Amino acid sequence: LSSSSAASDVYKRQVPMKRNISPLHDLIAFIRIFIILIKVRPHIVHARTPKGGMLGTVAAIVARVPIRIYHIYGLRFTTMKGWRRNIVYLAEKFTSFCATNIYSCVSTKICLEFKLCPEKKLTNSLNGSVNGVNTIEKFNPEKLHSERKTIRKDNNISENAIVVGFVGRIVKDKGFIELVEAWDILRNKLSNIHLLVVGPYESEDPIKSEVKRVLESDSRIHLMGLVLDPTSYYSAMDIYVLPSYREGFPTTILEAAAMRLPVVATRIPGCMEAMVDGETGTLVDARNVVHLADALLSYCENEDLRINHGNNGRDRVLSDFQPEAIWEFMLEEYNTL
């Protein structure tokens, strides 16, 4: 491996799998992964996401791959309830058992508290990020002035309006109930505020029908749907919000910070590592509508604070989350293993 390898050195094989528990489809995906591993005979299998992690590490054991990495992005079971929580927790624990090495984008303390794996298996990814942020060619506000004007014009948003933005899946776990309630407070106080939502609805963990109705009926809420590359949409925003109940290590916070946006997020693992409270944004308690509305209002009414925290955020991403450093970290890990 080389950190400067050309794209032609990377070979791709697709194995479709469902996000939800689906025994028949999961078995088919497992067999396909196993067949690929038997043909390739890799030294290392690096598996990510709960479903890919479990199928990948188990297939790697059966195929006798000596080094099996499980990369934990987030812990879904922490906000689940009942038998589904138990199943997902046991699946995480089983995947961790099958792995020889575990890299975590969430706090290693949480992994140990839930007894997912012994401490000797566990390593925190460099600063927690999966791949860092390209701040020069991609998430660079200096290069996206025209996109800001175009997106605002296309959505009938004036240049002097304040735009609160969100990028991600429209699901309950992302805090959309609280976001819509906080939005109701804000829109009644400010006539020039808009909400820009970039992302699709999902059938798993769906939002309530009344929340969906508000999102789709308010003329100052703009739903962009599924966008493969949301970079330009950050340029149209003034504040970024992520009121999630749970996160792994939220890349969108880094992307927003790189675009000089102050961030309002919940005080949960992942968000707490991705930003600095009072310097690059504001952390609020999860599910607390009043705190969420107050934090957003503070940025809406104080342009200097928006600019200061936005600049601090970009400086931090430039310092701590450059992709090249993370690539070198993983390359050194692979070579060592």
Image: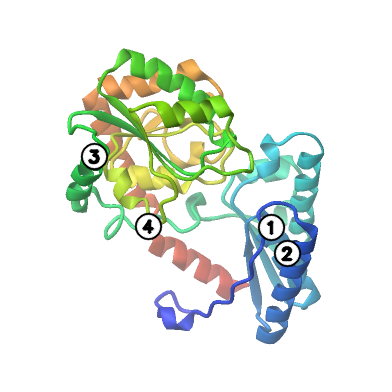
In space, the residues marked 3 and 2 are separated at their CA atoms by 43 Å
User: Helix or strand or loop: what does disc 2 sit on?
Assistant: helix
The residue identified by callout 2 is 55
Work out whether mark 3 precedes mark 2 in sequence or the reverse, and give the earlier one. Answer: 2
The residue identified by callout 1 is 51
In space, the residues marked 4 and 1 are separated at their CA atoms by 28 Å
Amino acid type of disc 1?
Answer: Lys
Mark 3 surroundings: few (<14), some (14-19) or many (≥20) residues within 10 A: some
Mark 4 or 3: in front is 3
Q: Are marks 2 and 1 in contact (CB under 8 Å)?
A: yes
Mark 1 surroundings: few (<14), some (14-19) or many (≥20) residues within 10 A: some
In this view, 11 is above or below 288: below
In this view, 282 is above or below 165: above
Amino acid type of disc 3?
Answer: Arg
Q: Are marks 4 and 1 in contact (CB under 8 Å)?
A: no
At 40% across and 46% down in the image, what residue appears?
254
Q: Are marks 3 and 1 in contact (CB under 8 Å)?
A: no
The image shows residue 154 at horizontal and vertical percentages of: 24, 42
- Taking the image as shown, residue 313 lies to the left or right of residue 184, namely left
Work out whether mark 4 precedes mark 1 in sequence or the reverse, and give the earlier one. Answer: 1
User: Helix or strand or loop: what does disc 4 sit on?
Assistant: loop
The residue identified by callout 3 is 152
The image shows residue 143 at horizontal and vertical percentages of: 20, 53
The residue identified by callout 4 is 322
Mark 4 surroundings: few (<14), some (14-19) or many (≥20) residues within 10 A: some
At 46% across and 32% down in the image, what residue appears?
265
At 40% across and 15% down in the image, what residue appears?
185
Mark 3 or 1: in front is 3
